[in-house]
Image (tube, coloured by chain):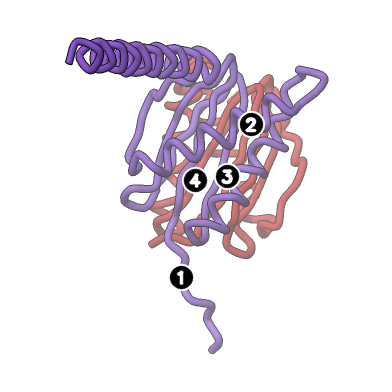
Chain colours: A red, B purple
Amino acid sequence: MLEGKAMVKETDMSPKMQIHAMASASQALDLYDVYDCISIAAHIKKEFDSVYGNGWQCVVGSNFGCYFTHSSGTFIYFALETLNFLIFKGTSS
Amino acid sequence: MEGAQEELERRSKFLKSLIQKKKTIEQQEQHDHLQHNNVRVRACDMPLPLQNRAFRCARDLLDSMPSKKLDSKRLALTLKKEFDTSYGPAWHCIVGTSFGSYVTHSFGGFVYFSIDKVYVLLFKTAVEPLDHS
């Protein structure tokens, strides 16, 4: 587990789910290189699909802006180490 | 009779030069278009008309930004709203120079392209009816 602490920038997730998101991100950073954003995103998305049902989306990177529509209570944007993480459920099934 | 033949030849030459001129102009426009747009599709599952619309929308907005500084959020917002309005909800758009993603999208609703030095991911997810229970 990395020493770095995650900082939530914006969210409407329950605290429990937030913790899960940040733990999943931290775990992904242990498994993959910090430059492998796609594998990190895939790890988190698959975790959330399996635990909370399909339709999750994940974006990881150091430079991006975005606009999206998400289900209620399923959105978090946080920073961990040098990366920013966006996780949301896009209402697909 | 000779006069008539001369007239026909003159008209024929004129038409040929018109056609040639038109071809040259079209080729030049095509070249300018590709150079100007500077778009490269990197992954795609989307009908061509929608792709072209995304490219044109992105190109127009980038050209209109006076500072030449990339405004990722604004481009993402513009694309998402244009596609939500034109092709129904719900579209999502990510714009930036350094990101990776892993997403699930609707059939025929996904394009990942670069324009200038910025990358754009635009995709659609199905929308479920609101639960009124």
The residues tagged by marks 4 and 3 sit, at their Cα atoms, a distance apart of 6 Å
Q: Amino acid at mark 3?
A: Ile
Residue wearing tag 3: A87
Q: Are marks 2 and 3 on the same chain?
A: no
Compared with A55, A37 (above or below) is: above
Q: Nearer the viewer, residue A13 or B51?
A: B51
Residue B105 seen in the figure: yes
Badge nearest the viewer, 1 or 4: 1
Q: Earlier in the sequence, mark 1 or mark 2?
A: 2
Q: Report crowding for label 1: few under 14, some 14 to 19, many 20 or more residues within 10 A (C-alpha).
A: few
- What label does residue A57 carry, if any? 4
Q: Amino acid at mark 2?
A: Asp
Extreme residue toward the bottom, this view: B133
Q: Amino acid at mark 1?
A: Glu
The residues tagged by marks 4 and 2 sit, at their Cα atoms, a distance apart of 28 Å
Residue A21 seen in the figure: no
| Tag 4 near tag 3, CB within 8 Å | yes
- What label does residue B60 carry, if any? 2
Badge nearest the viewer, 3 or 1: 1
Q: Quadrant of the N terminus of chain A?
A: top right
Using residue A9 as the reference point, say whether residue A19 is left or right of it: left
The residues tagged by marks 2 and 3 sit, at their Cα atoms, a distance apart of 29 Å
What SS does tag 3 mark?
strand
- The x, y position of residue A63, in whole percent, is 66, 23
Q: Earlier in the sequence, mark 4 or mark 3?
A: 4
Q: Nearer the viewer, residue A9 or B38?
A: B38
- The x, y position of residue A60, in whole percent, is 57, 30
